[in-house]
Image (cartoon, coloured by chain):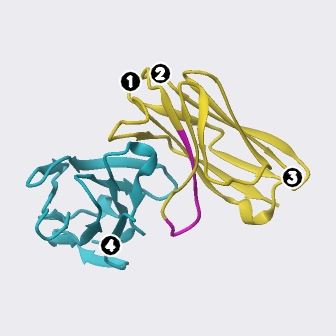
Chain colours: A cyan, B yellow
Amino acid sequence: GDSVTQMEGPVTLSEEAFLTINCTYTATGYPSLFWYVQYPGEGLQLLLKATKADDKGSNKGFEATYRKETTSFHLEKGSVQVSDSAVYFCALNPSGGYQKVTFGTGTKLQVIP
Amino acid sequence: DTEVTQTPKHLVMGMTNKKSLKCEQHMGHRAMYWYKQKAKKPPELMFVYSYEKLSINESVPSRFSPECPNSSLLNLHLHALQPEDSALYLCASSQDRGSREAFFGQGTRLTVV
């Protein structure tokens, strides 16, 4: 079946450091890929998405590129802020519709001043 | 308006109580979802409604009873819950079941005492 593997957290960075959160996936067909962010005590917000190979999703300084050859969708940001502290979920949606979306286990990011 | 609104934000209930969670969206979406999220875990799908009809029940215990009175509203009725049911309950909606993207509400933090 489909699966998403994220790097274990927590990831602790100093403000203005470079961020990478790794995400790899297993799926048949051509899934869409997402990154969601969950701030403490809140619901999930869609951060960015990519629907086909080589697409780059970007939002709020975050970027991720859909790499079919390596089955990866790593999240990056050049300079993190304290306000980026949250849990980040990588997710996969196969062609069968949203009810089949698969989430990764989440990676907690802590940014210290 | 890209909001999914959930009420209440927090709920504490006893094991003999009956309570309801409410979810509302005005984006014209025809698919709505309930998820349960335990601490430090990804969301787990509970129910999917499509065009106001229940289309997926992920083997959820009958003490959770969903209801979709109209295309904008989704309820989750709770009765005789157990302490292990304490979690964040998230509602989401998408254009339809085949959509690649969904919007999440802020969630209801439920504590069963």
Q: Chain of mark 1?
A: B
* Residue that badge 4 annotates: A6
Going 22% across and 52% down the picture, which residue do you hit? A30
* Residue that badge 3 annotates: B80
* Residue that badge 1 annotates: B1
Residue type at the position of mark 4: Gln
| Label 3 or label 2, whichever comes before in sequence order | 2
Label 4 to label 2: alpha-carbon separation? 33 Å
Kind of element beneath mark 2: loop
User: Does B39 appear in magenta?
Assistant: yes
x and y, in percent, of residue B36 in the image: 59, 55
Query: Crowding at label 3, few (<14), some or many (≥20) Cα neighbours within 10 Å?
Result: some
Asked if labels 1 and 2 touch by Cβ distance under 8 angstroms, the answer is: yes
x and y, in percent, of residue A110 in the image: 34, 72
Residue lying at the far left in this picture: please name it.
A54
**Residue bounds of the magenta highlight:** B33-41
* Residue that badge 2 annotates: B26
Circles 2 and 1 on the same subunit: yes
Residue type at the position of mark 3: Ala
Question: Is A24 on the left or on the right of B87, as rendered?
Answer: left
* Labels 1, 3: front one: 3
A63 versus B31 height, above or below:
below
User: Does A2 appear in magenta?
Assistant: no
Question: Is A25 on the left or on the right of A67, as rendered?
Answer: right
Kind of element beneath mark 1: loop
